[in-house]
Amino acid sequence: MTRAGTVARTPMPDTIKPGGTRAENHPWRIRLVEHPKRFESSFFRAAKRTARRILEEMDDADLPYGPRPVAPEGWEMHHGGSLWVRTAGGWRMYRARAGIEWSMQFCAEPPKVDRLRRDAADLVAGFPDTLPALADLGYEEADALLQTPIEDADGVEAWTDSLFNACVPLSRGNHQGILPKVPGEHHYPWPVKGADFFRYDDFQLWVTLPDGTHGAVTPVDRRGSGDGHVRLVLTAEGSRAADTLAEAQDRGLMAVMPPNSSAALQAFAEQIEPGRRTASGPPATRRARGNGGRSRAR
């Protein structure tokens, strides 16, 4: 992998054309200051305590963003719009239309947050076992949170740190991670990061691009097609491919890399025979990691 501050000399694939370098004439500055000490509100403490009790009751297969963290790591609670309900089959978590990060509460308009409250109340009303089950876990404030209109900053704070916003359970990597280790939700857009929780185990979503930066790619056709092209869906802002991706999006096109590109070979590495120079073609005969069966072509 290329070290920070250097540029890989591997040529870019033919389908990706660097867009040149641009600079602004107006300099800007960002002042770095010490972060005010963040306190943990009583609302958040109660919500986290309840969420952890819920997670203890859940089977591993039902966890929203499993697998369960292994000690010494534990769950980190993300302010991502966590709508917990008790169904006939046990606890389930849905995501709100928008989650309110802790720092975002200071720009949150109460009537708009109140709409999130009403959405949550409507959902919970469809699962009548929810409020009694939460009361049994000691979260007796749930009903008041769902029924009290949000009209001021105090109401926004209570909702922001409540079980219905602040308790999306994530591992540390999936919460705060940065590539090349694990891409976290705070640093990578959800439409791309979310694929980590439903992609095939033998498809590598995150790849290293020829200039040493990281990007995300997807197949261009369904599994079994044998097509090894990959579509570039995310690049770092400083990547040589960033302008091309932006241009493709502006023009309603796809930025596609060929089957013999390094990105495609990385993405399909576990689905092709070792040493093969193209990601297109028949599948490997070895077993795929994590799916309990033989690999199949893209």
Image: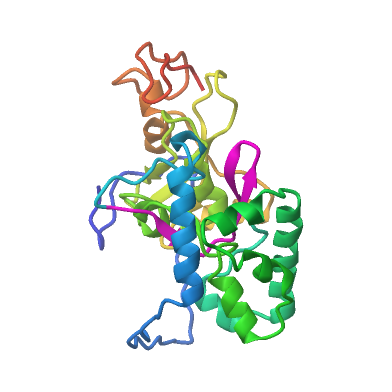
Quadrant of the rendered structure where residue 250 is? bottom right
Pick the front one: 245 or 18:
245
Q: Whole-percent x and y of residue 109?
A: 68, 81
Q: Whole-percent x and y of residue 132?
A: 64, 54
Furthest residue in direction top, as rendered? 285
Q: Whole-percent x and y of residue 157?
A: 57, 79
Q: Residue at x 28, y 50 (%)?
A: 8
Residue 77 belongs to magenta span: yes
Q: Report if residue 293 is visible in the image.
A: yes
Q: Whole-percent x and y of residue 126?
A: 75, 49
Asked if 252 appears above or below 261 in the picture, the reply is below
Asked if 121 appears above or below 129 in the picture, the reply is below
What is the number of callouts on the image?
0
Pick the front one: 15 or 74:
74
Pick the front one: 11 or 237:
237
> Along the horizontal axis of the image, is 35 left or right of 282?
left
Q: Residue at x 52, y 61 (%)?
A: 138
Residue 79 belongs to magenta span: yes
Q: Report if residue 18 is visible in the image.
A: no
Asked if 261 appears above or below 236 in the picture, the reply is above
Quadrant of the rendered structure where residue 100 is? bottom right
| Type of colouring | rainbow
Q: Main secondary structure of the magenta part?
A: strand
Q: Residue at x 58, y 32 (%)?
A: 220
Q: Residue at x 69, y 49 (%)?
A: 252
Range of residues picked out in magenta: 73-95
